[in-house]
């Protein structure tokens, strides 16, 4: 079983996010599958991750990459069978790796039998499982999330001659949680997967469950009540399992989803993510400190999830207009790179393949408060293809080797579910696991090392954070502390060498021990502690008192 | 003065922590407690609204204020730009401070600010005076945009002034500078201007002219720009409140300071102005300078009395400064009564040029010369007030242009007087 049977295992987790389709194809049909993932578990174990978050793998018309679910209690035949999934689960657990799966509560595919029934007639028993209206005038003013493709949150159903509500694509009708039967059905689905042994759910689109006239239809009290009910049942019947909220909101609004430790265990800290990118570009720690100072305290048992990139566009919803313009100008000058209110690029291309910046951002990811999530392929610096449409450019096949189909599949290349990245800079010939395994100085080797260092102390996952404010604004420095254990992190956010004087008087007498090398640094005294740092350098010091 | 003396260790450390910047605004201060907070807020607000992507720093150089100005300068902050969620500017807006000796001359502060600009590699800079208390974020931007966006190196301000405000500039500094150096820069005595990092480097490298820098720093800096063939312009900053009513002693000090500064500049830049034979306009950005219809209250009779008594009592001194013909003209017009009293342009220009020549040769103590000249200035101002009590802004402006042309036409006379042996 997993190495840490602690009920709060998620605080010490290093999560690896992957889509079954993209990872490894065992059957030769050009599409990744569950057995393929199982075959690569040793790679993930070696990397050091201890949890995998699987993107949706349910039967689906795949018009939203699986977030449009047509059957909640099965596996898409493209990816294998339920038995294959269960085999993966068992193999992962044997290696001490937990499995987190998606649960799309808010909506289904319009191909789901529930919706097919609901739309068949106004008298159908399932009619009330969705949100219908004779006009598109209800809930006026509610923002449209997929701005690039949708013009309304209402869609006309020609079959039942009425409108249905959808916060996402029009082929994803929203479920009606004012109907208790919906909640019961979804709980039944969750139980189905919990009984197979999954360790947690990422609940997609959590804020949008309930609609009320005159509101934003987001974060309503009734939505929280539903979450509390699910959590209550989870704790009672499946203790030790975890709920992760996808709520793209400002920190004060997201923190409400922790409740009094009776809603979600974890939630993504969306607003922090773009600000890490911003800070490195600005060479100024201000955006990071500002957003974290605005972040409320959360219950002790709860945890933020932090990340650099994921399967979606790098969202710029939770930034100001000024910040959004800046991010577009600096990271997505070509408008092809922009989607909805975000940037559809991977980490390495955004960092212009600058190894130092990639490392710095990962140092921030691994040392800031929260559970880090690594997006598949970012550990080797994979590139993207913005010309693939929607967000498919960041969902290309995993690059295992420089050989046939990057070692992803033995199928004909034309049969692959997506073209490979093949340019000389990021192509699979240049960027692949096999090559990087052979070098101790590769990005992959470095990622393994940083994960190892992070796992060497529980401070990172469970400790407090205190920002130091040296006069040099290009340096972001903070102390993480858990009990008596203290770690000092110092990051040079700039492209040039910097000198920084840190006020460490409160830690006078401590010996800083650099955590990668375990080299000793001069004892902390009364005077400001001077450090000189190279471009984009990050120091992690354990502060020891001996 | 070596640069390292300009920047003490503490200030240098502050500069190190700021690092390279794009925009630098310097604020020299001395007992400005009533206006410094508003000034700093306006500057910070301008950074947030107009230069939100740029790396910026505000530098306060205080000359030993005793009213808490220095502390107020560091504590005042603009309201957040984005009221929602408390997120304001994209970047840290730095604020650093240093000080000079008690009541140090403005030129010292300017030089310190330029040194900071040079070390911080600032591209666009400005000096903002807290004296007027009328600074807005737009006026700060108007000084910086021509440098930051349009590639100018020196930006002089233009103001909307009351009809009878700025008379020293209108009757002495502007026309004299224009005729001598060939550039029509109207406001070179306001304590505010914009400059590029390149100009800062040039000014710092110039060894001579310390006296001119001390006496008339804006004149010195503008002339450095001109002599280096740098691009200059004037930018409209809005209304300039009339200077508060001052005592007779303050008026004397202002006149002395202005004339002393002007003549110091002439002495230190002879190679630049002496060969110059024509004047060219300097581009004005935004609305041109403007004259507001209101007029401050002025005691005209007192001015006339001081002119008459000065001409009479200081005759022996005036004899050593002015040519006999010029003095005779002035003595002739002294007894004139309203409304006939006129101080003709030609007489005024000649008297200034003769004073300049005498100053250059130090025929008597320079202080005495300038002191003796003050009554003549009063006479000239009285004439101006009398003539324009009902004039429109256009009429006043036409008259000023006529005066400028007189200065230019008589420049050969200035050269004669300047180079005369006695």
Image (tube, helix red, strand yellow):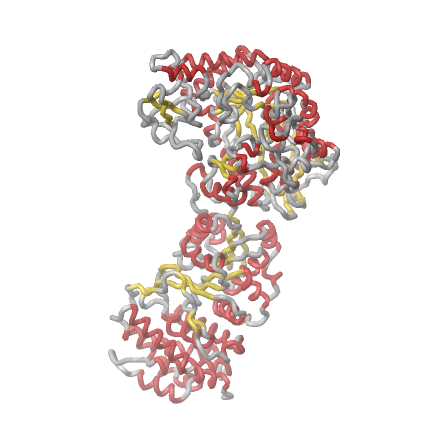
**Image position, residue A210 (x, y; %):** 40, 22
Residue at 37% across, 20% down:
A131
* Foreground pick, A412 / B43: A412
Please identify the quarter of the rendering in which residue A178 is found. Answer: top left
As drawn, A356 above or below A90: below
**Image position, residue B14 (x, y; %):** 58, 51
**Image position, residue B32 (x, y; %):** 44, 56
Figure label count: 0
Residue at 50% across, 58% down:
B125
Q: Is residue A453 visible?
A: no
* Foreground pick, A115 / A99: A115
Q: Which corner quadrant holds the C terminus of chain A?
A: top right
Residue at 47% across, 74% down:
B262
As drawn, B422 above or below A227: below
Q: Which corner quadrant holds the N terminus of chain A?
A: top right
Please identify the quarter of the rendering in which residue A179 is found. Answer: top left
* Foreground pick, A119 / B345: A119
Q: Is residue A164 visible?
A: yes
* Foreground pick, B273 / B317: B273
Please identify the quarter of the rendering in which residue B317 is found. Answer: bottom left
**Image position, residue B30 (x, y; %):** 47, 59
């Amino acid at each position: 079983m997993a190495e840490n049977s602690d009920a709060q295992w998620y605080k010490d987790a290093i999560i690896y996010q992957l889509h079954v389709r993209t990872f490894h194809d065992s059957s030769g049909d050009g599409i990744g599958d569950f057995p393929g993932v199982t075959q690569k578990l040793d790679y993930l174990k070696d990397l050091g991750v201890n949890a995998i978050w699987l993107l949706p793998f349910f039967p689906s018309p795949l018009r939203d990459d699986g977030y449009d679910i047509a059957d909640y209690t099965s596996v898409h035949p493209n990816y294998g069978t339920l038995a294959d999934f269960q085999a993966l689960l068992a193999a992962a657990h044997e290696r001490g790796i937990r499995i987190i799966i998606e649960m799309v509560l808010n909506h289904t595919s319009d191909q789901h039998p529930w919706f097919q029934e609901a739309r068949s007639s106004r008298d159908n028993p399932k009619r009330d499982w969705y949100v219908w209206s004779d006009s598109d005038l209800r809930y006026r003013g509610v923002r449209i999330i997929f701005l690039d493709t949708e013009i309304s949150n209402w869609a006309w159903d020609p079959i039942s001659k009425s409108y249905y509500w959808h916060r996402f694509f029009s082929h994803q009708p929203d479920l009606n949680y004012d109907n208790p039967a919906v909640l019961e059905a979804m709980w039944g689905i969750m139980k189905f997967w919990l009984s197979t042994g999954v360790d947690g759910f990422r609940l997609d689109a959590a804020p949008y469950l309930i609609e009320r006239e005159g509101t934003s239809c987001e974060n309503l009290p009734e939505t929280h009540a539903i979450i509390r009910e699910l959590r209550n049942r989870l704790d009672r019947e499946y203790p030790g399992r975890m709920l992760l909220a996808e709520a793209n909101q400002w920190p004060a609004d997201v923190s409400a989803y922790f409740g009094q430790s009776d809603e979600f265990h974890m939630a993504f800290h969306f607003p922090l993510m773009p600000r890490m990118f911003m800070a490195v570009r600005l060479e100024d720690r201000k955006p990071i400190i500002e957003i974290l100072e605005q972040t409320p305290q959360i219950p002790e048992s709860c945890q933020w999830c932090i990340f650099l990139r994921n399967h979606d566009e790098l969202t710029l919803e939770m930034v100001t207009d000024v910040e959004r313009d800046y991010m577009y100008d600096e990271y997505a000058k070509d408008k092809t790179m922009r989607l909805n209110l975000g940037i559809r690029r991977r980490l390495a291309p955004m960092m212009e393949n600058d190894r130092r910046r990639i490392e710095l951002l990962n140092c921030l990811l691994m040392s800031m408060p929260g559970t880090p999530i690594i997006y598949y392929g970012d550990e080797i610096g994979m590139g993207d293809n913005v010309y693939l449409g929607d967000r498919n450019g960041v969902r290309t096949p995993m690059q295992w080797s420089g050989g046939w189909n990057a070692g992803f599949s033995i199928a004909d290349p034309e049969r692959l579910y997506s073209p490979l990245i093949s340019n000389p800079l990021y192509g699979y010939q240049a960027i692949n696991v096999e090559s990087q395994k052979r070098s101790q100085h590769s990005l992959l080797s470095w990622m393994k090392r940083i994960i190892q260092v992070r796992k060497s102390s529980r401070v990172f996952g469970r400790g407090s954070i205190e920002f130091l404010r040296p006069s040099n604004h290009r340096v972001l420095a903070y102390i993480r502390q858990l009990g008596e254990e203290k770690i000092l992190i110092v990051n040079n956010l700039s492209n040039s060498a910097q000198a920084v004087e840190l006020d460490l008087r409160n830690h006078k007498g401590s010996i800083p021990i650099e955590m990668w090398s375990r080299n000793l640094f001069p004892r902390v005294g009364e005077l400001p502690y001077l450090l000189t740092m190279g471009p984009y350098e990050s120091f992690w010091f354990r502060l020891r008192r001996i | 003065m070596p640069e390292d003396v300009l920047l003490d260790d503490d200030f240098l450390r502050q500069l190190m922590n700021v690092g390279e910047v794009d925009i630098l605004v310097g604020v020299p201060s001395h007992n400005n407690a009533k206006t410094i907070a508003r000034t700093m807020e306006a500057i910070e607000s301008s950074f947030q609204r107009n230069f939100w992507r740029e790396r910026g720093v505000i530098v306060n150089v205080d000359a030993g204020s005793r009213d808490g100005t220095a502390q107020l300068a560091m504590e005042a902050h603009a309201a957040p730009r984005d009221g929602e969620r408390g997120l304001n500017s994209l970047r840290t807006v730095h604020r650093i401070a240093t000080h000079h000796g008690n009541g140090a001359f403005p030129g010292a502060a300017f030089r310190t600010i330029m040194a900071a600009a040079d070390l911080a590699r600032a591209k666009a800079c400005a000096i903002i005076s807290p004296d007027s208390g009328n600074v807005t974020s737009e006026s700060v931007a108007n000084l910086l945009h021509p440098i930051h966006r349009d590639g100018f190196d020196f930006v002089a301000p233009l103001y909307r002034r009351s009809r009878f405000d700025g008379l020293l500039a209108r009757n002495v500094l502007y026309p004299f500078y224009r005729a001598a150096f060939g550039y029509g820069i109207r406001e070179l005595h306001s304590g505010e201007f914009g400059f590029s990092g390149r100009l800062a480097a040039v000014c710092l490298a110039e060894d001579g002219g310390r006296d001119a820098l001390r006496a008339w720093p804006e004149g010195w800096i503008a002339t450095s720009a001109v002599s280096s063939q740098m691009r200059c312009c004037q930018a409209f900053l809005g209304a300039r409140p009339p200077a508060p009513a001052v005592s007779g002693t303050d008026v004397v000090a202002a006149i002395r300071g202005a004339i002393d500064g002007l003549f110091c500049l002439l002495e230190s830049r002879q190679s630049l102005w002496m060969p110059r034979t024509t004047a060219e306009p300097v581009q004005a950005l935004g609305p041109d300078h403007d004259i507001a219809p209101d007029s401050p209250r002025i005691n005209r009779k007192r001015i006339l009395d001081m002119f008459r008594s000065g001409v009479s009592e200081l005759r022996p001194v005036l004899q050593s400064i002015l040519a006999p013909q010029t003095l005779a003209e002035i003595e002739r017009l002294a007894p004139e009564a309203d409304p006939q009293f006129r101080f003709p342009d030609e007489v005024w220009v000649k008297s200034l040029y003769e004073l300049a020549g005498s100053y250059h040769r130090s025929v008597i103590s320079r202080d005495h010369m300038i002191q003796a000249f003050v009554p003549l200035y009063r006479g000239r101002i009285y004439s101006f007030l009398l003539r324009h009590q009902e004039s429109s802004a256009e009429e006043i402006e036409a008259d000023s242009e006529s005066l400028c042309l007189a200065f230019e036409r008589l420049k050969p006379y200035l050269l004669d007087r300047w180079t005369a042996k006695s």
